[in-house]
Protein backbone atom coordinates (compact mmCIF):
# COMPACT_ATOMS: atom_id res chain seq x y z
CA UNK A 1 0.00 0.00 0.00
CA UNK A 2 1.43 3.40 -0.98
CA UNK A 3 1.91 6.03 1.69
CA UNK A 4 1.11 9.61 0.80
CA UNK A 5 3.09 12.13 2.80
CA UNK A 6 3.22 15.89 2.44
CA UNK A 7 6.24 17.68 3.85
CA UNK A 8 6.50 21.45 4.08
CA UNK A 9 9.82 22.97 5.11
CA UNK A 10 9.79 26.66 5.98
CA UNK A 11 12.23 28.77 8.03
CA UNK A 12 13.72 25.74 9.73
CA UNK A 13 10.33 24.22 10.51
CA UNK A 14 9.09 20.95 9.06
CA UNK A 15 5.38 20.24 8.71
CA UNK A 16 4.31 16.67 8.09
CA UNK A 17 0.83 15.77 6.89
CA UNK A 18 0.02 12.06 6.76
CA UNK A 19 -1.59 9.26 8.74
CA UNK A 20 -0.56 9.27 12.43
CA UNK A 21 1.59 6.14 12.14
CA UNK A 22 3.47 7.55 9.15
CA UNK A 23 4.07 10.87 10.93
CA UNK A 24 5.51 9.01 13.92
CA UNK A 25 7.88 7.06 11.66
CA UNK A 26 9.07 10.25 9.95
CA UNK A 27 9.66 12.01 13.27
CA UNK A 28 11.75 9.05 14.48
CA UNK A 29 13.90 9.19 11.34
CA UNK A 30 14.41 12.97 11.57
CA UNK A 31 15.22 12.67 15.30
CA UNK A 32 17.98 10.16 14.54
CA UNK A 33 19.82 12.90 12.65
CA UNK A 34 18.87 16.03 14.63
CA UNK A 35 18.16 14.84 18.17
CA UNK A 36 15.15 15.89 20.22
CA UNK A 37 12.68 18.05 18.31
CA UNK A 38 10.30 20.71 19.53
CA UNK A 39 6.93 19.89 18.01
CA UNK A 40 3.22 20.19 18.27
CA UNK A 41 0.76 17.57 17.16
CA UNK A 42 -2.95 17.75 16.69
CA UNK A 43 -5.31 20.34 15.30
CA UNK A 44 -4.11 23.48 17.09
CA UNK A 45 -0.75 25.10 16.37
CA UNK A 46 0.98 28.41 16.96
CA UNK A 47 3.63 29.54 14.48
CA UNK A 48 5.32 32.94 14.78
CA UNK A 49 2.32 34.41 16.58
CA UNK A 50 -0.18 32.93 14.16
CA UNK A 51 -2.80 30.59 15.61
CA UNK A 52 -3.73 27.78 13.22
CA UNK A 53 -6.74 25.58 13.95
CA UNK A 54 -7.51 22.63 11.71
CA UNK A 55 -11.22 21.99 11.95
CA UNK A 56 -12.98 18.64 11.81
CA UNK A 57 -14.72 19.91 8.66
CA UNK A 58 -11.33 20.35 6.92
CA UNK A 59 -11.50 24.13 7.24
CA UNK A 60 -8.46 26.00 8.52
CA UNK A 61 -8.87 28.97 10.86
CA UNK A 62 -5.99 31.42 10.98
CA UNK A 63 -5.99 34.16 13.59
CA UNK A 64 -3.65 36.45 15.46
CA UNK A 65 -5.79 37.47 18.42
CA UNK A 66 -2.81 37.86 20.76
CA UNK A 67 -0.93 40.03 18.25
CA UNK A 68 -3.99 42.23 17.71
CA UNK A 69 -4.58 42.57 21.45
CA UNK A 70 -0.94 43.54 21.96
CA UNK A 71 -1.30 46.29 19.34
CA UNK A 72 -4.55 47.51 20.93
CA UNK A 73 -2.95 47.59 24.39
CA UNK A 74 0.07 49.43 23.06
CA UNK A 75 -2.17 52.00 21.34
CA UNK A 76 -4.21 52.48 24.50
CA UNK A 77 -6.90 54.75 23.04
CA UNK A 78 -10.39 54.06 21.79
CA UNK A 79 -12.21 55.62 18.85
CA UNK A 80 -15.41 56.20 20.75
CA UNK A 81 -17.84 54.61 18.33
CA UNK A 82 -18.27 51.67 15.95
CA UNK A 83 -16.69 51.99 12.51
CA UNK A 84 -18.01 50.28 9.37
CA UNK A 85 -14.64 50.02 7.62
CA UNK A 86 -10.94 50.20 8.53
CA UNK A 87 -10.50 53.57 6.84
CA UNK A 88 -12.45 56.67 5.88
CA UNK A 89 -12.66 58.31 2.46
CA UNK A 90 -9.97 60.76 3.51
CA UNK A 91 -7.35 58.04 4.06
CA UNK A 92 -5.18 59.21 1.14
CA UNK A 93 -5.46 62.92 2.01
CA UNK A 94 -2.26 64.38 3.46
CA UNK A 95 -2.33 67.78 5.15
CA UNK A 96 1.23 69.09 4.86
CA UNK A 97 0.41 71.69 7.53
CA UNK A 98 -0.78 69.22 10.15
CA UNK A 99 1.13 69.20 13.43
CA UNK A 100 3.83 66.51 13.52
CA UNK A 101 3.73 63.90 16.28
CA UNK A 102 6.18 64.10 19.17
CA UNK A 103 9.19 61.77 18.94
CA UNK A 104 7.66 59.46 21.55
CA UNK A 105 4.28 59.29 19.83
CA UNK A 106 5.90 58.98 16.39
CA UNK A 107 7.91 55.99 17.62
CA UNK A 108 4.72 54.43 19.00
CA UNK A 109 2.95 55.09 15.67
CA UNK A 110 5.79 53.38 13.81
CA UNK A 111 5.81 50.38 16.16
CA UNK A 112 2.06 49.82 15.96
CA UNK A 113 1.95 50.22 12.17
CA UNK A 114 4.79 47.67 11.82
CA UNK A 115 2.88 45.19 14.01
CA UNK A 116 -0.31 45.78 11.99
CA UNK A 117 1.62 45.17 8.77
CA UNK A 118 2.70 41.77 10.10
CA UNK A 119 -0.90 40.97 11.10
CA UNK A 120 -2.35 42.22 7.81
CA UNK A 121 -0.05 40.16 5.63
CA UNK A 122 -0.82 36.94 7.50
CA UNK A 123 -4.43 37.04 8.62
CA UNK A 124 -6.22 40.36 8.06
CA UNK A 125 -6.32 41.33 4.38
CA UNK A 126 -9.35 43.53 5.13
CA UNK A 127 -6.99 46.11 6.66
CA UNK A 128 -4.38 46.09 3.88
CA UNK A 129 -5.32 49.40 2.26
CA UNK A 130 -5.24 51.37 5.52
CA UNK A 131 -2.03 49.72 6.72
CA UNK A 132 -0.35 50.23 3.34
CA UNK A 133 -1.02 53.97 3.52
CA UNK A 134 0.06 54.27 7.15
CA UNK A 135 3.38 52.56 6.35
CA UNK A 136 4.15 55.48 4.03
CA UNK A 137 3.70 57.87 6.96
CA UNK A 138 5.91 56.31 9.66
CA UNK A 139 8.83 58.69 9.04
CA UNK A 140 6.67 61.82 8.93
CA UNK A 141 3.59 60.99 10.99
CA UNK A 142 1.28 63.79 12.06
CA UNK A 143 -1.94 64.29 14.00
CA UNK A 144 -4.07 63.34 10.96
CA UNK A 145 -2.15 60.07 10.58
CA UNK A 146 -2.72 59.33 14.26
CA UNK A 147 -6.48 59.81 13.74
CA UNK A 148 -6.36 57.40 10.78
CA UNK A 149 -4.54 54.87 12.95
CA UNK A 150 -7.12 55.43 15.68
CA UNK A 151 -9.94 54.59 13.27
CA UNK A 152 -8.10 51.50 12.05
CA UNK A 153 -7.59 50.32 15.63
CA UNK A 154 -11.35 50.69 16.19
CA UNK A 155 -11.89 48.28 13.30
CA UNK A 156 -10.02 45.57 15.17
Image (cartoon, rainbow, N blue to C red):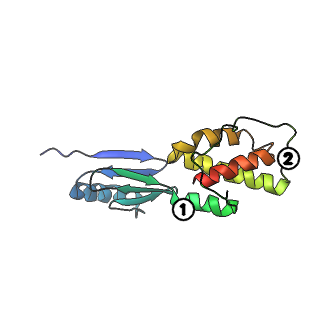
Residue at the spot 36% in from the left edge and 51% down from the top edge: 60
Q: Position of residue 15 (x, y in %)?
A: 37, 51
Between residues 89 and 25, which one lies in front from this camera angle? 89
Residue at the spot 63% in from the left edge and 60% down from the top edge: 72
Which residue corresponds to mark 2? 100
Count of numbered circles in the view? 2
Label 1: few (<14), some (14–19) or many (≥20) C-alpha neighbours in 10 Å: few
As helix, strand or loop, the secondary structure at mark 1 comes to: helix
In terms of sequence position, does the residue under pointer 1 or pointer 2 come before the other?
1
Compared to residue 131, the image places residue 49 above or below, namely: below
Residue at the spot 78% in from the left edge and 36% down from the top edge: 94
Residue 152 horizontal side relative to residue 93, left or right: left
Between residues 4 and 150, which one lies in front from this camera angle? 150
Q: Position of residue 52 (x, y in %)?
A: 41, 55
Q: Position of residue 84 (x, y in %)?
A: 57, 47
As helix, strand or loop, the secondary structure at mark 2 comes to: loop
Residue 82 horizontal side relative to residue 44, left or right: right
Residue at the spot 74% in from the left edge and 52% down from the top edge: 109
Which residue corresponds to mark 1? 66
Between residues 24 and 120, which one lies in front from this camera angle? 120
What numbered label is drawn on residue 56? none
Amino acid sequence: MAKIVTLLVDLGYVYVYAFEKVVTEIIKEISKHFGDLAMTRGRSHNFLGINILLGEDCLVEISQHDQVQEALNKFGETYGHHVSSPCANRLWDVNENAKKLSKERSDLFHSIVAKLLYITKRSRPDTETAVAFLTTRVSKSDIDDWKKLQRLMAWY
